[in-house]
Image (cartoon, coloured by chain):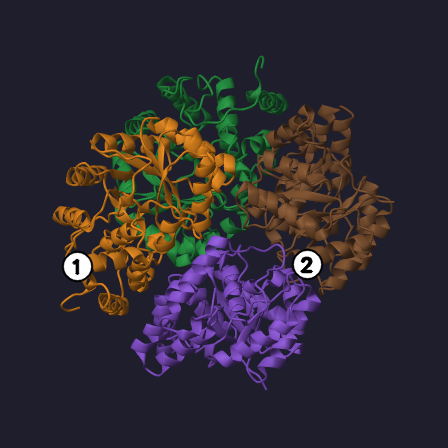
Chain colours: A orange, B green, C brown, D purple
Amino acid sequence: MTTLTKNSSGVFPIAPTPFHPDGRVDVASIDKLIDAYLAAGATGVTVLGILGEAPKLEPDESLDIVQRFTKGFGSLPVVVGVSAPGFAAMRLLTRKAMDAGAAGVMIAPLPSLRTDDQIIGYYHQAIEAIGTDIPFVIQDYPLTLSVQMAPKVIRQIVQAQPSCVMLKHEDWPGLEKISTLRAYEAEGSMRRVSILTGNGGLFLDFEMERGADGAMTGYAFPEMLADVVRLQMEGERDAAHDLFDAHLPLLRYEQQQGVGLAVRKYVLAKRGIIACDAQRKPGSALSEKARQEVDYVLKRVSRVDPRASFRSA
Amino acid sequence: MTTLTKNSSGVFPIAPTPFHPDGRVDVASIDKLIDAYLAAGATGVTVLGILGEAPKLEPDESLDIVQRFTKGFGSLPVVVGVSAPGFAAMRLLTRKAMDAGAAGVMIAPLPSLRTDDQIIGYYHQAIEAIGTDIPFVIQDYPLTLSVQMAPKVIRQIVQAQPSCVMLKHEDWPGLEKISTLRAYEAEGSMRRVSILTGNGGLFLDFEMERGADGAMTGYAFPEMLADVVRLQMEGERDAAHDLFDAHLPLLRYEQQQGVGLAVRKYVLAKRGIIACDAQRKPGSALSEKARQEVDYVLKRVSRVDPRASFRSA
Amino acid sequence: MTTLTKNSSGVFPIAPTPFHPDGRVDVASIDKLIDAYLAAGATGVTVLGILGEAPKLEPDESLDIVQRFTKGFGSLPVVVGVSAPGFAAMRLLTRKAMDAGAAGVMIAPLPSLRTDDQIIGYYHQAIEAIGTDIPFVIQDYPLTLSVQMAPKVIRQIVQAQPSCVMLKHEDWPGLEKISTLRAYEAEGSMRRVSILTGNGGLFLDFEMERGADGAMTGYAFPEMLADVVRLQMEGERDAAHDLFDAHLPLLRYEQQQGVGLAVRKYVLAKRGIIACDAQRKPGSALSEKARQEVDYVLKRVSRVDPRASFRSA
Amino acid sequence: MTTLTKNSSGVFPIAPTPFHPDGRVDVASIDKLIDAYLAAGATGVTVLGILGEAPKLEPDESLDIVQRFTKGFGSLPVVVGVSAPGFAAMRLLTRKAMDAGAAGVMIAPLPSLRTDDQIIGYYHQAIEAIGTDIPFVIQDYPLTLSVQMAPKVIRQIVQAQPSCVMLKHEDWPGLEKISTLRAYEAEGSMRRVSILTGNGGLFLDFEMERGADGAMTGYAFPEMLADVVRLQMEGERDAAHDLFDAHLPLLRYEQQQGVGLAVRKYVLAKRGIIACDAQRKPGSALSEKARQEVDYVLKRVSRVDPRASFRSA
C-alpha cells in the first residue's frame, strides 16, 4: 500500500504529459516515461503539476493519467497537484485522485494571498475542504506564485495541519530557509516533515547539505538527481558535486521560465523516453537556434556523464 | 431564441448564488431571484461570476444553476462566466453552458498577462479553444485581475474576434475609456460592441452619458440600475442622477472588495428576495456593526426611493 | 510649539502643489491655499504626498513648500511625506523637514514588502534611520502600494516604535480594521494612536463612527470634511450624513486613481483657491467632457451646500 | 574624451560600494576595486546601481563615488544608474553625474507600468526630463521590476529616442529576445544599439552567441566575464564555454536575489580587492554555513581557473 509520509525521500520527478503531434495524449509514451523514471531510481512521482500541462487536460484525461502512474509506480507514492482557484474543484480532484490510488496531493497558495494569516487561513480552509485525512504537500514557490511564506508561517501550517507531510521547497534563494526549518525541528518547535526541493534542481547540490530529503523536479535526467541525492546521503560530497556540476549548464538552461518545458520535452524525446516533444496548444516550441544550443550542451555534459551522449543530433 | 449581440443593452444583474445556512444551494431562492430580476426590468443576467461564488460550486450545481436561469429568463440572454486557468476547463464549461441554453460566455484575462500582445494572444487562444461561434464578452477588470488593457488592445481583440459582442467595462477610472472606444467606433476603426459597465455601478450615472449601453453588476436594487439606464436613454438626465445619487451611499457601501457580497446578500435577504444571506464556506459575514450601518443607509435611501423601505430592521 | 501626537484629530488636508502654466511653483497660490485650509477648519496639513506631485519637485522647491506651510500653519502641525526607496534619502528629507518646522513625517512601506515580519522590520529600520525621536505616521494604503498590513502587524509596529503617533488609514475595505485597532486599544494590547482616514474620504461618514479621529485627505471642499468630523464628534449623526451624502457624488468622482488630482485642482481653481489647475509635467488634464461632468455635479451639490455654488462655469 | 555609444562592448562591471565595518564609505577600497576592474579587462563600469547600495548613500557620497570612478576609468565610460520614482530626482542626479564625467545614464522603468504605451511614454517623459543629449541605457529587468517590455516596445523606444545607445538586457528567459532584436536590426526596422547582458551573467555563454556585445554585471571574477566575451568574439566557442562552465557553480550561487551582494562582497574581500564585506545598514550577511559553501565552490572553481585559488579559507 502506497503512502506519502514525513519520511519520504529521494527523487519525485515532476512528470510532463506526452502528446502526439495532433494533440492527443500519448499513452504509450506515458508508460515509457514511467519505466524510465523507475529505472532512474525515482522513489515517487508528481503528476498534474504546472509543467504537466494540467490546465490543458480534460477531466477524464487527467484521471486516466493519474491511474496510469499509480498503476505503474505500484507501491511507490504518486502525488497529484490539486491547486485550484476554488475549493470545490480542489476537493473534487482530490477525491478522484485518491480514489485512483494517489498517495497524497500538493497544494499551492492562491497568488492573491499576502499576509501571514491569510496564507495560514487558506491552508486551513483547503484542508477542511479536501478532508483532514489526505496527506498533503505545501508548495512554496514565490517566483511563480508571488506568495511569500516566512519559515514561521510554514511552521504554523505544519503544526496546525497534522495531514501535512511534506514541503515542496522552491523559494529562491532558499538555502537558509531549509536550515531554519530544520532548526525549528531540532529545537522541537516544529514537527518533522519531508522537504523535497524544486526550482529545477538549481541548488540541489547544497540543498541536500542543508537538510533536504531529495528533489521534486522535472530535470530531463532524473538519474542525475537520484545519484546526487544518493551520493550526498552516503557522504560522497565531492562526487555529488562533480556529477551535479557536469549537468549544471544544461540544468540551468532548462530552468528558464516558460521555455523550460520545451527544453525538457526536447531532451526526453531525444533520449527516446517520449515519442515527440509536442505540447498541447497553446504551447511553446524551441527555436532552431535553441535546439542547437541544447545539443551543444548535451555533448559537453556527455564528456563527464555518458548517459547524456547520443549517436547523432 | 435567446441571443447576445453587439446591440444588447439594459441591465444584466450579476446573480449571487443563494445558499441554505447548511451550505446547500437554495433553489427556491434562485427562482425568487429570477422573478425579482425580471420584475426589476433586467434585460439579461450573468451567472457563475466571481460574486456568484462559482469556485465553490460542484460542476453539477453550476450546471443546474445555469439551467434554472436560462429557463427562467426565457428569451432573455443568460451570460455565463467561464474564466479558468486552463483552456480545457474553459471549453468544457462553455460547452455545458451553451448546451444548457446560455446566450454567451464571459472571459477574463489570466492575471499573469502583461504585454499588449500577451493579452491579445490570450483571447485568440481562448476563442480557438471554445469555438469561434460562441458569442463572448471581454471582462476588463484591472482592479481585481491586475491586467491592464489599453483601449487599442480591446480594439485589436474586437477586430480579430468576430464572436466578441460585448465588453464588460470595469476599469477604474474608466469614463475616458468608454469615450475612446466609442470614438474608435465613430471613426470606423472598430466595429460596434455592446458596453455594459460593472464596478458595482459606482459611475453608472456618467457611464451612460459616455456611451455605455447599460450595466452588468450586482447591486441589490437592480430596479434602480434599470431606472437609471432607462432615464438616461430617455434623456431624463436630472431624474437619472437624482435617483442614482439617492442610492449612492449604499451602492458605495456595497462596492467594498471582499465585503460587497455579504452586504448584497444581506440586503437581498432583507428584501425577501433570497431566504438567507449565507455564503458557502469559506465565506465572510457582516459584523453586527456593519449590519446596523447598512440598515441605517437603507433607511436614508428610502426617503427618496420607497423601494428601499422596510417595516423593521 | 507645534506637535503631532497620539491625540491629534480633525482634518489634515493633503495639500496639492499649485503650479503656474509654465511649470513654476505658484507661491502666491500656496499662501491662498493655506488661508483656505485654515478658514475651512483644518487642524493640520500634510505636504509632499503623492498628490502633492512631490516626485516632480526639486529639493529646494520641496523645502520651500514645507517652510511656507509651517509658517502659515503656525502652531498647527505640518506632516511631511518622506517615503523613499532608500533610507538615506528618507533620513535627509526628514531632517530638512523637521528643521523647517514640521511636526512629524509620514512613511509608507516599500511596495515590495510581503510577509508580516518584512513589514515590521522595514519600519524598525526606517525609524532607526530617521531617528527614534521623530513623531511619525504609518501610511496603510494597500490599493496603491500593494502592501497588506494586518491589524496585528500595525499593532506590532505601534508597540515597537514609541515615536509612532498616528495611522493614516486607507485600507479598502477598512471599517472593520478601525474597529479591530480600537478594540486592541480597549483591551490594552495596543497603545492609543491617532487614526486619520484617507481614500479620498469615501467612507469618512462611517469611519468616524468606527473610531477614527478625523480625515487626512485632499477633497476639494475641506470644510465639508471638517464639518462631518465635527458633527460626528458632537453626536449629530444624521446631520453629518446629510452633508456627506450631498457631497458624495463629487467626492466619488474625485476619488478616481490617476484622475483625482486633476479634478481636485480643477475645483480648487474654480473656487479661486489656486490660480490655475496646471500640473507639472508629466501631468494629466481633464477632458472637456470631464470638466462638464464636474461642473454638473458641483451644481447639484450646491443645492444642499451653497459653498459649492459658482456664478458661472 | 569618454563616450558611451551604440558600439560599446566588453565588460562593464556593476560596482559594489565598499564600506568600513562602521558604515563609512571605504574610499581606499574603491581605488583598489577600480584597479582590479581595469586589470580584469573591464571596458567600462556601472555605478550607483541597486547592487551598489545606492539608496543608502547620501547625495555627496554618491557624487564622490561617481567622481572616483570617472577619474580612475579615464577614457573608459562610466554609466550611472539614475532610476528614481520622480523625474526631478532623475534629472538632478543625471546632471550631477554628467558634470562629474559620466558617459551616460541607465534608466529602469517604474514598477507600476503595465501597457506597452505606458512604458514607451515613460521613456519619452524621462528623456524629456533629463535632456535629449544624454546617452542612456534601457534597463530591462522584469524579474525585479515586474515590468515586461516586448521586443517591439524596446524597438519603439530605441527608434523614438535617438539618445538611447544601449540595452541592459536582463530578461529571463532572454535568449530569443536578443535574437529578435538583432533580427529587427538586420531587417532595418530598428537601428543598432549595444546590448550588454545582466542577470548575474547566468546565460552569458549563449548570450554572446545570440548577438550580445558583452556583459554588464557584477560577478566577483570580472576577468572570467571578460575572457568569455573575448573568446566568443574570437570564435573560440569551446574555450569560452569551458571557462564559463567552470565558474557556473559559483556564478549560480552568486545569482541569488537578496543574497547575491553578500556573496559578491565576501569573494571580493577574500580576493583582497575590497577590505571587508560589510554592507551599510540595513544589509544582509552570509551565514557561517553559506561562507563555507562559497569557500568550497571557490576551491572547486580553482581546479580549472587558478585565479580562484586562495592560500587558506
Q: Residue C231 in the image: x percent, y percent? A: 76, 28
Res. A46 mark: none
Q: Kindly identify the amino acid type of the residue bearing the numbered disc 2.
A: Ala
Q: Residue B201 in the image: x percent, y percent? A: 52, 36
Q: Residues within 10 Å of mark 1 (few under 14, many from 20)?
A: some
Which quarter of the image is occupied by the N terminus of chain A? top left
Q: Kindly identify the amino acid type of the residue bearing the numbered disc 1.
A: Arg
Which residue is at the far bottom? Answer: D1
Q: Secondary structure at mark 1?
A: loop
> Are discs 1 and 2 located on one and the same chain?
no
Q: Secondary structure at mark 2?
A: helix
Judge from the rendering whether residue C39 lies leftward or rightward of residue C262; answer left or right: right
Image quadrant where residue B11 sits? top left
Q: Which residue is disc 2 drawn over? A: C89
- Residue drawn at x 21%, y 37% is A63
Q: Chain of mark 1?
A: A
Which quarter of the image is occupied by the C terminus of chain A? bottom left
Q: Work out whether residue D115 can be spotted.
A: no
Q: Which residue is disc 1 drawn over? A: A271
Looking at the image, residue A32 lies above or below residue D280: above
Q: Chain of mark 2?
A: C
Instruction: Count up the numbered dots.
Output: 2
Q: Residue C118 in the image: x percent, y percent? A: 56, 45
Q: Residue B226 in the image: x percent, y percent? A: 49, 31
Judge from the rendering whether residue D154 lies leftward or rightward of residue C109; answer left or right: left
| Camera-nearest residue between A52 and D226 | D226
Q: Work out whether residue B92 can be spotted.
A: yes
Which residue is at the far front? Answer: D312
Q: Nearer the viewer, mark 1 or mark 2?
A: 1
